[in-house]
Structure formats: C-alpha cells, structure tokens
Amino acid sequence: MAGGKPDKAAKKEAKLAKRAASRARYKQIWEAFKMQRREDKALIPWMLGAFLVPIVVVFVVTLFFGLEWITLPVGIALGLLAAVSIFGRRVQKNVYGKADGQPGAAGWALDNMRGQWRVAQGVAGTTHLDAVHRVIGRPGVILVAEGAPHRVKGLLAQEKKRIARVAGTTPIYDIIVGNEEGQIPLDKLQRHMMKLPRNISGDQMDNIEKRLDALGSRAQAMPKGPMPAGAKMRSVQRTARRR
C-alpha cells in the first residue's frame, strides 16, 4: 500500500457514506415533522412550550447567583432535548393510533422493540388473520395474541400447551393485545413487556430458541406490519389460504 493511498481513499469513502447517511436521517426526520405538523395542530405549541420552560426555569434559578447568562446554554440544551422528546412521543402516539386494530399491528410493534428480544411472528394463526406471536427474552417466553378475543383465547391456550412440552421450567407469559378489560393496548405493549421480570440468562434464551424453532409453526400467512386501511379482508384471507 504505497503512500497509504488505498487507506486514504477508504477513509474518504467511509466519511462520504457517513455524511450521506446523516443527511438521509435528517431528511427522514424533517419529513416526519412535516407530516406530523399537518395532522397534529398542537405539535408546535407543545414543542415551543417544552423548549421555553427549561430555559426560563434555569434562567430564574441561576438569576439569584448572578449566573443566568453563563448557564443559559444549559437551559437551551435542555429545552431542545425536551422539544425533541415531545415530538418523538407525539409521532409515536400518532403511528400507534393509526395501526391500532389492524391485523399485523402487534407483530409490527414487537419487531420494533429495542433490546434482546427474539420475535417469531405468527407462530399460530387463522384465516381471519388472528395471530399468536412468540417472543423470547429475559423474562422467558411471551406469547402475544391479536385478533378476535373469542378466537385468540383458544389459539393462545393451544400454543401455550404446545410450548410447555419443550420449555421445561422456563416461564411462559401470554398477552392479548386490545382495548378491552384484561387486554394490553397496542401503544402500551412494549412498556408492559419491559416491566416483566428477568428470569433467564442469554444462554438459556439460545437454548429455548433452538428447541422452539424445532416445533415449527401452525400459522396462516400474516401481513408484515399493520394491514393498510381499506384493504379488503376477503382478498387477504384468500391469499392466506393459498399460502
């Protein structure tokens, strides 16, 4: 590598790629902001309030010590952080609101979870697009069902019994996503799962995953993510039967 030219070229290429990825990310955020602003008239007032309150609080508190101008950048930084947090929460609420009640919404929410969660979508299901998703995590095995309650309860019970044969002492939790009593709303699903106790180690997760993968799936085909509004249920069910 005479003169280090290949290394220099590689570094330059990596730098350009990083810059392009950063621009794409900012563009996505800006597009999300414009979309949210059109649908959420309270977004700007909430973000403005979240930005100004920390600045005012820091300014007033440090005024007594004569440090108000020195600490002003701290207030601005806190204000920006609060405004971005408000924006993220309102976008998330909007997205979950649109997805709520649509087939595949729970599977989509599980796929977007952060952390060491191993999601197998639609391990059991029906042609009506009811589904049971399996998640392996530090709590153990979590079965998450979505669909008509009178159908998914039986589906859950069957899948739980099937998994119990190979799960040994691994805890098995079951959740039905919905807005009725005893169910977990879609927008609270991730938070609910994060609160479950940690019962098994990473090695145990690997072991149970191998055993459960050997069981296979009893599911009909499920849409990847929430089914678009207006999609005809009969045509989707026909596709599921063919698969």
Image (cartoon, grey):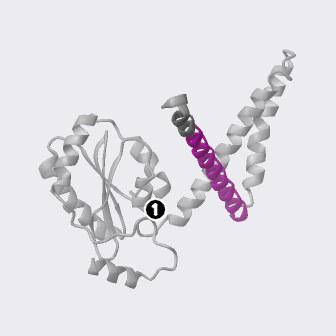
Q: Along the line of sight, which residue is nearer the eye, 26 or 237?
A: 26
Secondary structure mostly seen in magenta is helix
Q: Along the line of sight, which residue is nearer the eye, 219 or 31?
A: 31
Q: Is residue 108 left or right of residue 46?
A: left
Q: Position of residue 113 (x, y in %)?
A: 44, 48
Q: Is residue 118 left or right of residue 89?
A: left
Q: Position of residue 99 (x, y in %)?
A: 50, 65
**Residue 52 lies in quadrant:** top right
Identify the residue at image location x=28%, y=64%: 153
For the record, the magenta segment spans 12-39
Identified by mark 1, the residue type is: Asn
Would you place residue 95 above or below residue 169 in this image? Answer: below
Identify the residue at image location x=30%, y=66%: 152
Name the quarter where the C terminus is drawn: bottom left
Would you place residue 68 above or below residue 88 in this image? Answer: above
Identify the residue at image location x=44%, y=52%: 189
Identify the residue at image location x=74%, y=61%: 41
Q: Position of residue 58 (x, y in %)?
A: 78, 27
Q: Please, what secondary structure does the residue beneath circle 1 have?
A: loop
Q: Position of residue 217 (x, y in %)?
A: 22, 63
**Residue 43 lies in quadrant:** bottom right
Q: Is residue 121 visible?
A: yes
Q: Which residue is mark 1?
A: 179
Q: Residue furthest front?
A: 2
Q: Along the line of sight, which residue is nearer the eye, 180 or 225?
A: 225
Q: Is residue 200 visible?
A: no
Q: Residue furthest left?
A: 165
In magenta stretch: residue 35: yes
Report the number of discs.
1
